[in-house]
Amino acid sequence: FDRLRYVEVKHGRIAQLAFLGNIITRAGVHLPGNIDSAGDSFDSIPDGWAAVGAIPQAGLLQIVAFVGTLELFVMKDITGGEFVGDFRNGALDFGWDTFDEETKLTKRAVELNNGRAAMMRILGLM
C-alpha cells in the first residue's frame, strides 16, 4: 500500500503543477525573453500539446535531463520519513514540525484530494 500511496502523492503533485502551468500559459502569461539562441520568444510557443512540437529538440532534451535528475537523485521517498511521500529529505521544513498530529493528517488528506482532482483536471485539459 505504501508504494501505491507514494506514487499517488507524487503524481498528484506533478498534476497540480501541470494544471497550474497549463492554466497560466492559456491566460497569456509567458516568461520574458527568448527560449533559444535563434531568437524564438517564449510567447511564440503555443499552449497545450502543441508546445511539445514547437520547443527546440535541445530544449526537450534539457527538460528530460532535468526531470530525470530530479527523479533519480532529489525527489526520493526516503526510508524513515515521517510519512509516505515525505520528500523533505531532512532539508526543508516550512514549519511542518510545529503542527499537531491532527493538523498534519488533515493537511495530508487535503493534499491527497487536491492531487486526485488535479489529475482529473489535467486529463480534461489534454
Image (spheres, rainbow, N blue to C red):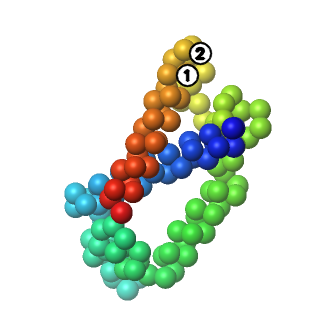
Q: Name the residue that disc number 2 marks.
A: 101
Looking at the image, which is closer to me, 42 or 51? 51
Near mark 1 (Cα within 10 A), the count class, few <14, some 14-19 or many ≥20, is few
Please give the name of the residue rendered at 61% of the width and 47% of the height, measured from the top-left corner. 7
- Relative to residue 95, is residue 27 drawn left or right? left
Please give the name of the residue rendered at 58% of the width and 62% of the height, measured from the top-left corner. 67
Identity of the amino acid at label 1?
Leu
Q: Quadrant of the N terminus?
A: top right
Q: Is residue 91 visible?
A: no
Residue 22 vs 2, above or below: the answer is below
Q: Name the residue that disc number 1 marks.
A: 105
Q: Is residue 58 visible?
A: yes
Near mark 2 (Cα within 10 A), the count class, few <14, some 14-19 or many ≥20, is few
Please give the name of the residue rendered at 66% of the width and 30% of the height, measured from the top-left corner. 83
Q: Position of residue 109 (x, y in %)?
A: 50, 28
Residue 83 vs 38, above or below: the answer is above
Please give the name of the residue rendered at 50% of the width and 75% of the height, measured from the top-left corner. 60
Labels 1 & 2 near each other (Cβ < 8 A): yes
Q: Quadrant of the C terminus?
A: bottom left
Secondary structure category for the residue under label 1: helix
Identity of the amino acid at label 2?
Glu
